[in-house]
Amino acid sequence: MRIGIGYDVHKLCEDRKLILGGVEIKNGKGLLGHSDADVLVHAVIDAILGAAGLGDIGKMFPDSDDTYKGANSIGLLKIVNKKMSENNYEIMNIDSIIVAQSPKLSPHLEKMSINIADACGINKNRINVKATTEEKLGFTGENKGMAAHAVCLLQETC
């Protein structure tokens, strides 16, 4: 068994779509980043890569490479899942949390879990997505950005 942790943060800005867990959420502001800036999926990717000992998202998909400009993060997760499988690992479970003051994310959490599970080729019951606020404290509480944390447990398959 191997465990990895992932963390990501992005700034909120005008004229961007808000994509979390592969779900577009109406918000008026989106997250700034080289790809679609899906902070949740980026944290999940880092957790998987960390557990597998395969570096991190910046190493695998550098923001200096225009190939990934505007990239769909769920698509990147599929690439990571393939790489993880090639290295003889299977995802046992992923637990994650999005930190955002607004909008309310609870109506979207189930779809986020399904999107992540589908991208990883596993049953949805192995994925948990939660959301919380920081009670108006810090950059997330002041609605300046969003953060996400994820933990992944892998098992070697050979």
Image: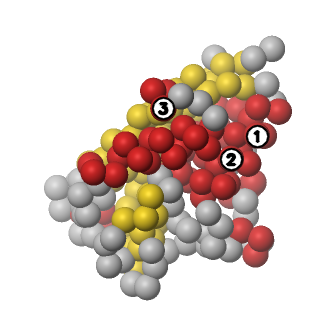
Query: Which residue is situated farthest in the top direction here?
Result: 158
> Residues under labels 1 and 3: Cα distance?
18 Å
Quadrant where the image shows the C terminus: top right
Residue found 23% across the figure and 58% down from its top: 104
First of labels 1, 3 by sequence position: 1
Q: Is mark 3 on a helix, strand or loop?
A: helix
Residue found 45% across the figure and 41% down from its top: 113
Mark 1, residue position = 82
Mark 3, residue position = 124
From where the camera sits, is residue 9 visible? no
Query: Would you say 104 lies left or right of 13 here?
Result: left
Query: Would you say 135 lies left or right of 61 here?
Result: left
Up/down of 101 relative to 54, above or below:
below
Q: How many marks?
A: 3
What is the three-letter code of the residue carrying label 3? Lys
In this view, the mark in front (1 or 3): 3
Mark 2, residue position = 78
Provide residue 62's location: percent of width, then percent of height: 73, 64
